[in-house]
Every structure is written in structure tokens, then in C-alpha cells.
Amino acid sequence: MIKLSGKLKPLNSLRPLSKLLVCTLLDGLSNDEAKGKALLCDQAKIVGKYGAVLRKQAMGKLQDIPEFLLPEDMQHLSEGDVIRISEDGHSVRVLFRAKSNHNAILLTEQCNHYCLMCSQPPKDIDDSWLLDEAKQLVQLLPTTTEEIGFTGGEPTLYGDGFIDLLRLTNLYLPNTAVHILSNGRSFKDIEFARKYAAVGHKDVMLGIPIYSDDPVRHDYIVQAEGAFSETIAGILNLKALRQRVEIRVVLHKQSVPRLVQTAEFIARNLLFVDHVALMGLEVIGFTRANLDDLWIDQFEYKDKLSEAVDILEATGLHVSIYNHQLCLVNTDVSNAYRKSISDWKNEYVDECKSCTKQYECGGFFSSSKQFRYSPNISAFED
Amino acid sequence: MLSNFVGEYKILQREKLYSFARHQLPADDSDYIDLRAKQFLLDDSNSIAPQLLSIKTRTKYSRLADFTALHIFVVSLRCEHSCPYCQVSRQSEDRDSFDMTEEVADRSLELTFQSPSQNIKIEFQGGESLLNFDLIKYIVVQAKKINEKVNKHLGFVIATNLAPVTHEMLLFCKEHDIVISTSLDGPSDLHNKNRPRPGKNSYEKAIEGIRLVREVLGQDKVSALMTTTEASLNRVKDIIDEYIKNDFDGIFLRHLSPYGFAIKTKSYRAYSTERWLDFYKEGLQYIIELNKMGVPFREYYACTILSKMLTNSDPGFVDLMNPSGMGIAAIVYNYDGSVHPSDESRMLAEMGDNTFRMGNVLENTYEEIFSSEALVKPLEESFTLSAPMCSDCAFESFCGADPVYHYATSKDFLAKKPESDFCHRNMSIFKYLICLMEEDPYVKRLFFRWAHRS
């Protein structure tokens, strides 16, 4: 797994002027071009006035450019990556990895849900600087960027601020696929939904969770009363405005008992959505604290998963299974199975060593490998 | 069995039903949770339910706004077959006075394109429609000419026994994207017994015709319909095998209707509804077994009903619509210019009963025809949501009004439902389909795919 934040060692007393810097390997850029760039370079002499220079080895101190030493685990930085160096110069965060197709940009840690399995536990603090940072970021990215994700917390809690970010994204990244994770409740306000639709980005998808056909069960899982009705109202408004919506169902001990009914509910009530994602549990955040209430072996629910997929696919819905191991699902869902865990964060366990299908399999989140995975993992043989 | 307004259903034990009706079912009871999820009940936690239910209701009735999509042209009443069960009362072949004229066709096309529907399907029927193929050609060319200005989705179907079909006719069909609907009653002996023609070779002609259509137009351009006669009753497996042998992917197991020669020759009363239901159930069981063995094959009447049970979209099958599909879903322009709200009602007219005659294309305007008492009165009087016994029937949303049937059998658009074979037959099928799904998870999944045509 690649680290996205780490310590930094300042090599002189200078600090970058701009908050966000785009990494580059190119020395000799004009001063104008260089000022927003962080040069990855171990040569002693630098031509050009870069925003910062990042070293793999400690060098002679530069006089006029902020100079930092990268720790080993941050030396993966490469051309086009966007970073933020803290004001004290002692830490660095990666906001965007040019080589990855799974760049998720955290917009806030505030949320009006408090999901049992939240991977990004909400904090009630003013973190609107994250939104400002995202607004800067979309202006720095190349127009050829294939996909970005906006995530939270609940990004729509910014209201118009969130819409502003989308407008900027539409201006600077009109060809980039934009995936937004939201609980959808804000869109129950038709005026807000209209503003969202009016942005008119041609390739944007909202991923909205529905955990059960039973409103009480859904509200319990997200720990918010009335959430189910608001989320559905939001989806209905969005689809009435012809916006693309993906339903995301995280599968765990609380949602699996009504998985088949939930698929039937989607088939009967929400047939007009654009994608249904059935997602395995990631053992991080609140899930670790609530593991006993959430953990279920994927092997135990594989027949229910098959039935749910069969129902959804029979209606013509586009269905994907994410975050599952290939040896724990039935072969009849192969059409929906995705090798979904990003290459840079998936891992395999000892049982997988002799498996002949490892390259078709999504593997594990490193957190699952560490904390809990199914005892029914078994290698495929020829 | 409980059903909601759009036909989602739930099976409840009787005691649970009583406690539900008395508002005593505990909120953590699994049946309570199911009922809430399907919007049978509203409590503080599912305030969105009325909105979901209303969207589904609008979807279910959305066809009404489109109005008439199927326009049937009876281009000739002549036929070289002499089927005793004929519901149309065909005329012998050489009587030109039973052919539609170009004048009637022109005027009918004018009316056709006044329909608000964006989808227009023109179906040619008979008698034997191919006996007046020149008029079919005329109508197709004229319709396409008119459509150049209005740009609707326009399609054509020829209903034919295929005996008179020629390669040349099919080249015309290919050029204009016309599909074929034919009759196939079963194996050779049964088919030829049911459908006599000079030469006693109706079956051979039909099979050769099907082969030729597929060769010229393509594999999926021909569909077939069967009619159940007394001789069919013990042969359901043979009939289904015949369809499979001829590469059809489904069959519509049809009962006889009480119209035309079927009444005169007593074919219609030759078997009871009960006997037909046994035939139907045996056929459906056999089709399910075939699917279990890996032969994908469907029964289309079940598909139609299952769509109404398991989806929100109405398949638009005229007999199973409420308000009735007569005139609204389909309209018939008879060879003589008279206009009828359904195929069955023109059959009544051939028997001398003009109750449903909406007017004549040569005499009346679109407005006169579509607001005629002959259409509006039966639509209104048969409306199931206000009909005694229908309005509180759990199967209402699967069923239909069918005023023409009820008028034909009891001279009343509504009729007394306990005496209605239509009611008895359909209720029996509804119950049977639900039982099959409840008893066998395989059937539930199979039927779900049938309902969604996937």
C-alpha cells in the first residue's frame, strides 16, 4: 500500500508560497512555470525558481528555493502528482496521484450520517479549507485526467459551496469522469437538485447508499432517523432531472439479511438508476469498533448475493460486485464481479499463494488482511 | 394474498392478516417489515412511501396518455381456409365485395395518423390478408409517405395463415421491414384437423411459409399463435414440442373466444373453462420442466400476467387492461369502413351485433368516432376499479375489464363476475402462477425473468 501522507524534513528555512504544488521531474522550467511546481531532483544545481525542491538524499542547502528531504515511504512521488506541504514544512500530503485512476478527494469530514461501518468517521469541525483546497486542485489537474472522485463526510453539506466546486470542475475538467459519494439527502430539496443538474457536467455520477428496503434498518445502519425517506426523495429528484445515480449497498451482518428484498425493492421502485454496486465491507474506521455487529463471512451469503444479482440483472440494471474475493462468490455472478480494489491498495493472504486465479481476483484491503478475513478462502487450482 | 395498488403482492397467514387489519401487528414482525417495504402500510419511518407508490401508479397507467398504438386493417374477409372455430366468420374466396377499397384504406390511414401515440403499429388481418396483398402494398407505401411528415415510430405486421405467401410478397416485406404473425395449432394431424383447407395441407403450407419467411426476412421475423380446440386438450405437450421443433422461443396457450363461427359451430362450448385450465396448467408445468432441463422456452400469457405482477409496466394486452384496451390500445378498421374498438368487437359485428360499432371512416370524423357512445359507454361501465367485486379484488391490478367479452357472453358490459368465465379463468391462472412461485424458488426466478423479458 502506498502512503499518501508523511513526514518531511526541511533542509533550509524557506517555505513554499503556494499551498498546492504539482510534482515535476523537469528542471529548467521558466520561473513562471516553475513557481507552482515541486521539483523532484537530486542534482545540486537547480535552474529555475521552483516552489519547492524535494530530495531523496540530503543536499547542500539551496539559497533561494525551499528544499526538503523526502522520507523513504514518500519517494513514490512522480510527475504530475499534486502535494500539499504543511506550513511548518514538516509534513506532506498527496492530493492527487497522476498514475492512479482512483483519486478520491476528501471534501469534508462532517456528515449527517453516523454509519456503523463508516470508513472515514465524521468529525464536527470546520474543515471548509478542504473545499478551498479541492477548488484549487481541480484547476491544477491536466484536462486529460480520466477520473476523479469527491468524497466525505457528506460533500453536499456545503450547499452552494459544493455546487461551486462542481462548476469549477466542469470548467477545468470537462472531459474527466467525476464520481461523487453522497448520502443523497440534500437532493430532497428540489432547488438544490436543480442547481446540481444545472452545472451540466457531461460525465458525473452520484454514488448514493441504500442499505435496505426496510427504512428502519437503513436508518439504524446510518444512525440517522428519517434518512431512508430523504435519500429516496433525493434519488427521485435527481432522476426526474435526468442525473446519473449509482446505488451502493455495503454488505455486512446488518444489511445481508434483507439483501434479496433490497434487490427486489430496487428492481420495483428504482429501476431508473444507472448502476447498482454491491460492496464488501472494508475493515477500517468504525467497522473496527463495531466488527462483531458487522462482520459476516462472504462465503455465508454467496447464495443471497447470487439471487440479488440475478434479480437486478433480470431487470436490465447494470450491477457490480466490489470488494469481494473470487473464491467466496458463486460462478453465476461472474458477469457482475469486479476486480475492484485499487491496485495500489490490494493485497493477498497466504492462502492465495498457490491460487491460479489471483490475477482475476480483487484480493483484500490491507485492513481486512490485518484484522479479519474469511476462514473459507481457498486457492483455485488448475 | 394481499396486493397493493400497483400489484405488488404479499402472502400472509390468516392470523397475521387479522392482526394487521386490526392494527395489532407488531412493528418488529417480519411481515410488518415486508408490508412496510412494499408500501402496504405507512408509519413514521417511511414517509416516502406515497411518493414511490404514486410514481409506480403513473408508470403503470402511462400507456393511457399515448392512446391508440395498434391499428388493425381488415383488408379482406375472404379466406381459403374453413376453420370451424373461426372467430371472424370468413367469407368464401371469390367475393370481391368483402375486400377493403383504396378509398376506405386512405381514410383509415388519415385516422391512424391522428392518434396521439408516437408509436404506430399497423396490423393487417383477414379473412386471409394476403388474398388482398395489392392493398397491403398500397397501405404500406401510403403510410410511409404520410409518416415522412410526422415521423412516428411506424411498424407493420401481417397476420396470415401463410398458405398464399410467395417469395415476391416477402421481398416487399423485407423492403418495408414488415413482420409476420401466423397460426400454428400443433403437430400436422391436429393442425390440419383444426384448420381445413382445400388440399388438407394447411400445416404443410404453414411450415413451408415459416421457413420461407425466416429465409427472406430473418429468424425472428415470424411469430405464431395457437388456438385450443377440443382435439387439442390432450395434446399440450405435442403442441409445445411442435413449437420447439420449429425454433419458436415461446407459445401463447390460447383458449377459444365466444365470437364468430366459434359460437355458430359450437366449438366455443366444446370444452369447459375447467378443462381448458387443466390443459393450460399441464402445458405450463411442461414448459417449466423444459427450462429446468436447459431449454429456454416461455408461455406468453403467463409472461403478460407476470409483467403486471412483477413490474410496473403494463404490457398493453387488450384483454387484461383497465380501463379496457378497446379503442384505447387498439382500433380496427373493417373492410367496409366500419370502425370497431377491438378485433373481438368486429367479430361481433360480423355476427350482426353492432353494439360496439364506433362509426364509419367514410362518414365520421376522428372526434366523432373516438367519442362515440359505442366506445365511451362500455369503457366507463366496465371500469374495474368501480365495478362490484372487481374493485375489492386482490387480483384487480393483474386483470382487465374486457367489456366485449362480457357483452358477448351476457349482453352486459360489466356482467356478474361470479358467473363470468373470464373472471374464473383469469383468477385461476393468477392463483396458479403465484402458487408456483411460492412453492419453487427456481420458478420464482424464471418467472421474474419472463416478467422482465430477459
Image: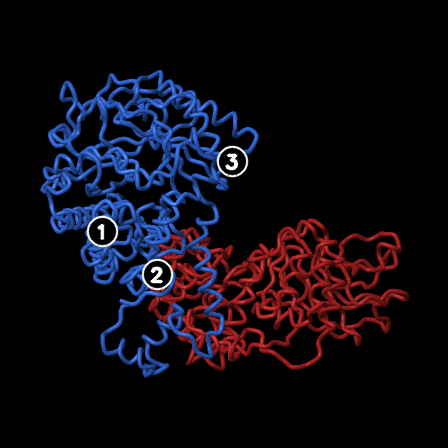
Task: Give the answer, above or below, for where A211 lies relative to B85.
Answer: below
Judging by the rendered image, the residue that carries numbered circle 3 is B152
Circles 2 and 1: CB distance less than 8 Å? Answer: no
Judging by the rendered image, the residue that carries numbered circle 1 is B422
Q: Colour in which chain B is shown?
A: blue
Q: Is residue B139 left or right of residue B263?
A: right
Circle 1 SS class: helix
Percent x, y of residue A382? 33, 51
Circle 3 SS class: loop
The chain letter under disc 1 is B
The chain letter under disc 2 is B
**Which is in the foreground here, disc 2 or disc 1?**
2
To the question of a shared chain for discs 3 and 1, the answer is yes
Task: Give the answer, above or below, for where B392 lies relative to B192.
Answer: below
**Which is in the foreground here, disc 3 or disc 1?**
1
| Amino acid type, mark 2 | Ser
Count neighbours of disc 3 (C-alpha within 10 A) and say few if under 14, some if 14 to 19, many if 20 or more: some
Residue B212, image quadrant:
top left
Percent x, y of residue A332? 34, 54
Distance (Cα) linking label 2 and label 1? 18 Å
| Amino acid type, mark 3 | Lys
Choose between B252 and A166: the one closer to the eye.
B252
- Residue drawn 13% across and 51% down? B274
Count neighbours of disc 1 (C-alpha within 10 A) and say few if under 14, some if 14 to 19, many if 20 or more: many
Circles 3 and 1: CB distance less than 8 Å? Answer: no
Distance (Cα) linking label 3 and label 1? 35 Å
Chain given the colour red: A
Task: Give the answer, above or below, for where B227 lies relative to A290.
Answer: above
- Residue drawn 67% across and 54% down? A200
What numbered label is drawn on residue A30? none
| Amino acid type, mark 1 | Phe
